[in-house]
Image: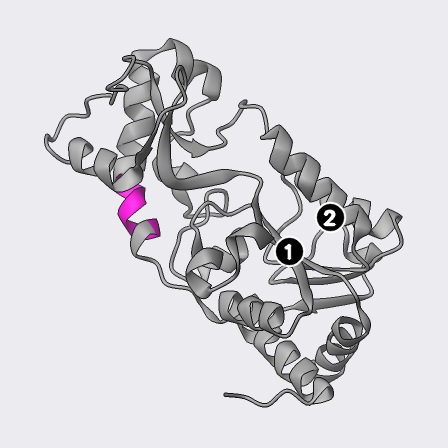
């Protein structure tokens, strides 16, 4: 492990543009359940596909039932050592951006600049009308959902359109602007840190491949093997919150940065 930590730190130290790509494994260390893993959210709540959400009131009720139950956990979660280490990298001038699959806004809470965070799966911090695009704070909608035991599907006050969290559901098109920016950043970096992602969800999982094909070095930190391990310069099987802070501390040592 010590050798892998040192090698990863050396790659960050030498890099000019470091992009971090973060997945669900980063969020689980803050107590947010994974969706796909055994015991995850999909075992308790059946996923609702976007087309069903658009066409079926019962599907919308299922969607909001799950959201009502899971939102407080995400809302109350705190940044963990991975998030804080990435905020440190930004302060050190080593981080170009974070591309995240997570919807929890924990990178924002940790102190990373909003303009450096690309949320390719959206965010649950607010709700958007699918008709007029008016947005509402998620807490406001949560209060409405909790008024009664039975779920009442919320509607837009302006146009009576369907409301949905600003997250990407199964079958929903990926956000064009964010995906284009993420692809550009992936292809223009010289090092990508892939953190807590199983790299099985596409098109997001293409981004580390784009970086590697463009000549970037690749570091993967994940509890279990991924399909891209053979492409990586360094692979560390660990919780990101255990490995990344140690890597960042070594980078700081090499840069002569003092802890404050």
Percent x, y of residue 123: 44, 41
Residue 41 in view:
yes
Question: What residue does disc 2 label?
Answer: 185
- The number of numbered discs placed on residues in the rendered structure image is 2
Q: Earlier in the sequence, mark 1 or mark 2?
A: 1
| Label 2, residues with CA under 10 Å away: few <14, some 14-19, many ≥20 | many
| Label 1, residues with CA under 10 Å away: few <14, some 14-19, many ≥20 | many
Q: Which residue is located at x 65 percent, y 83 percent?
A: 252
Quarter of the image containing the N terminus? bottom right
Question: What residue does disc 1 label?
Answer: 97
Report whether 206 appears left or right of 82: right
Secondary structure type for disc 2: helix
178 is within the stretch colored magenta: no
Identify which residue, 38 or 59, lies in the foreground: 59
Q: To which quarter of the image does residue 43 belong?
A: top left
Report whether 158 appears left or right of 8: left
Q: To which quarter of the image does residue 76 belong?
A: bottom left
Percent x, y of residue 26: 52, 59
Percent x, y of residue 107: 49, 58
Percent x, y of residue 22: 59, 54
Identify which residue, 167 or 133, lies in the foreground: 133
Secondary structure type for disc 1: strand
Report whether 254 appears left or right of 124: right
Q: Is residue 54 above or below residue 126?
A: above
Q: Is residue 131 above or below residue 8?
A: above
70 is within the stretch colored magenta: yes
Residue 239 in view:
no
Q: Which residue is located at x 26 percent, y 37 percent?
A: 68
In the image, the segment drawn in magenta is 69-74
Pointer 1 and pointer 2: residues touching (CB < 8 Å)? yes
């Amino acid at each position: 492990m010590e050798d892998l930590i040192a090698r990863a730190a050396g790659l960050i130290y030498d890099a000019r543009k470091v992009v971090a790509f973060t997945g669900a494994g980063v969020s689980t260390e803050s107590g947010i359940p994974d969706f796909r893993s055994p015991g995850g959210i999909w075992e308790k709540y059946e996923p609702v596909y976007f087309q069903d959400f658009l066409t079926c009131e019962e599907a919308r009720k299922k969607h909001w039932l799950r959201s009502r139950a899971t939102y407080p956990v995400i809302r109350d979660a705190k940044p963990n050592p991975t998030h804080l280490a990435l905020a440190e990298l930004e302060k050190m001038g080593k981080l170009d951006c974070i591309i995240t699959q997570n919807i929890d806004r924990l990178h924002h809470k940790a102190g990373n600049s909003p303009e450096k965070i690309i949320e390719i799966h959206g965010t649950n911090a607010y709700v958007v009308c699918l008709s007029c695009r008016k947005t509402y704070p998620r807490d406001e909608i949560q209060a409405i959902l909790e008024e009664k035991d039975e779920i009442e599907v919320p509607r837009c006050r302006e146009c009576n359109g369907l409301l949905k969290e600003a997250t990407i559901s199964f079958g929903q098109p990926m956000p064009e602007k964010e995906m284009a920016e993420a692809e550009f950043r992936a292809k223009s970096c010289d090092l990508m840190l892939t953190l807590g992602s199983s790299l099985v969800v596409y098109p997001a999982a293409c981004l580390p491949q784009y970086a590697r094909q463009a000549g970037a070095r690749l570091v993967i930190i994940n509890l279990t093997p991924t399909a891209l391990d053979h492409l990586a310069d360094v692979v560390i099987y660990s919780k990101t919150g255990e490995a990344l802070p140690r890597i960042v501390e070594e980078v700081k040592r090499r840069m002569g940065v003092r802890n404050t």
